[in-house]
Amino acid sequence: MLVTGEFLKKYPEVARMAQSKGVHPRRVAAGEISKIWGHSGMAHQGIALRVGRLSGHDGSKLRVEDIVSAHLSNTSTVVLLDRVTDINNVGAIVRSAACFDVDAVILPEHHSPSESCVITKASSGAADIVPVVQVGNLVKTMEYLKQHGYWCYGMDAGGDKALHEISFCERRAIILGSEGKGIRRLTREHCDHLVKIPMSARIDSLNRSKRLVIAIDGPSSSGKGTLAKELANVLRMQHLDTGKLYRVFAVKFPHKYSQARSHEEIRLNTEEEEEMLAALNNDDPGYYSEHVGRMASILARNSQVRSALLPIQRQFVLNAPQGAVVDGRDIASVVCPDADVKIFVSAYASVRARRRFRQLCGSNRKAMYKTVLFHLLHRDIRDTCRSSAPLVRTEDAIYLNNSHMQKAAALRELVEKIKTFL
Ligand SMILES: Nc1ncnc2c1ncn2[C@@H]1O[C@H](COP(=O)(O)OP(=O)(O)O)[C@@H](O)[C@H]1O
Ligand SMILES: Nc1ccn([C@@H]2O[C@H](COP(=O)(O)OP(=O)(O)O)[C@@H](O)[C@H]2O)c(=O)n1
């Protein structure tokens, strides 16, 4: 067992359990675990364990014939991937296949990631549940499947039937195409049906499994939270409002902040972290008050507070199966520096103050425009001038000044830009 120091610090009980079973964890740097995958971009959680073969995996290569003969008299679903090259996409498809009781995922030997620990990792272990079978020729495999009673359904944006109009036969092969090009011509010609998934008019090509991380930063009341929530909705991803996390911390753990002011390290145990994550779904208006916002903005200057909240944010992103839209101040620069898409949302201070003023009036809180503007400018100064993770616009971020845009127009513009990353 290889573990990183950070993992050991966070989960000492795992080391104790391993030792009680005669396994002695060896402490290594995170990079050493990355090397095992042979894939530098692969995220891991700081632990790797060498295991024997799972029962039922005898080491010989599975063949399509084995899958077909194991399901001769039953309903059967197999998924064929036509040159899906991104390992994370293959992993996500195998994971979904495990949820939908698929009998096998079949991919061509060439032009696909080879089955290895990388697929197992990318599928979060689902490759141990659903057999991944490699074949020499996909079209011949489709012909073989047809001879054994399977109907072939190709998923294609230009398909003649919508998914809900199809009544699937009991034995079916679902064919998914590659990331950019879709299903190849010959494969398409061998499908019995081409099926499309109708999309929302707002986004007409949703990549079925590409996991995306979208980082959105911007000053107070620029509209980043509104855009982040809408984007997550349109792209069916999870949304993390990191400002809310700072607000929750300010409400729940003010005593820890006093400790941090004397430069003591802040520790949050697993229960406290879970309490914070649960509060993210709590819409109690108390969290959104100006007073709590101000407290959050003051304690967010403290580097101990930021260090304590950083792993919670990163873990949230790691755990989001379809990826996440994360909004805040230091997302592109600190929390997710490797995000696939980085966005910086801004608007003039007077516009932002007017928006916040309207928001406060709408929620029946007493507000004066001048006071709102005053607090907002102070918040801008605290956010941009603090030494720890200040608000910055990174060079690779898409810039959107939405001062003169309605919410829907701003969203449409971002969706258009993001489409190029899908
Ligand atoms: N383009 C826009 N036009 C008008 N009002 C907006 C726009 N974008 C956001 N708002 C409103 O401004 C307020 C602050 O937006 P919010 O998304 O919470 O900002 P942030 O997350 O950047 O602090 C909300 O009441 C929101 O409905
Ligand atoms: N990633 C983040 C998110 C919020 N914050 C701070 O936390 C405060 C509350 O976040 P918010 O997004 O709810 O606040 P406002 O948009 O109301 O300013 C902000 O004023 C920031 O100072 C931060 O420092 N870093």
Image (cartoon, helix red, strand yellow):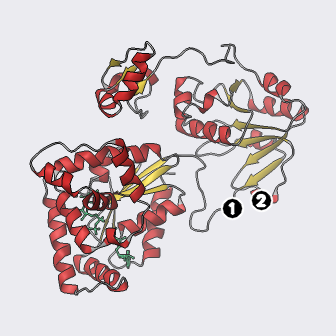
| Whether the residue under disc 1 has CB within 8 Å of ligand 1 | no
In the displayed structure, would residue 267 be above or below residue 55? below
Q: Quadrant of residue 33?
A: top left
Q: Say which of 363 and 219 sits in front.
A: 363
Residue 384 visible somewhere in the drawing: yes
Residue 199 horizontal side relative to residue 396, left or right = right
Residue 211 percent across, percent down from the top left: 51, 46
Q: Quadrant of residue 301?
A: bottom left
- Residue displayed at 29% across by 73% down: 289
- Residue displayed at 43% across by 43% down: 318
- Residue displayed at 33% across by 61% down: 244
| Residue at disc 1, secondary structure | loop
Residue 212 horizontal side relative to residue 67, left or right = left
Residue 25 percent across, percent down from the top left: 37, 18
In the displayed structure, would residue 121 be above or below residue 329? above
| Whether the residue under disc 2 has CB within 8 Å of ligand 1 | no
Residue 162 visible somewhere in the drawing: no
Residues under labels 2 and 1: Cα distance? 9 Å
- For disc 2, the neighbor class at 10 Å (few under 14, some 14 to 19, many from 20) is few
Query: Of the numbered discs in the image, which one, if any, rests on residue 198?
Result: 1
- Residue displayed at 56% across by 23% down: 116
Q: Say which of 155 and 244 sits in front.
A: 244
In the displayed structure, would residue 370 be above or below residue 140? below
Which residue, as the protein is rendered here, is positioned at the far left? Answer: 262
| Residue at disc 2, secondary structure | helix
**For the residues bearing labels 2 and 1, Cβ distance under 8 angstroms:** yes
Give the image quadrant in which the ligand numbered 2 is located.
bottom left
Residue 392 percent across, percent down from the top left: 22, 57
Q: Which residue is mark 2?
A: 164
Q: Could you tell me the amino acid type at mark 2?
A: His
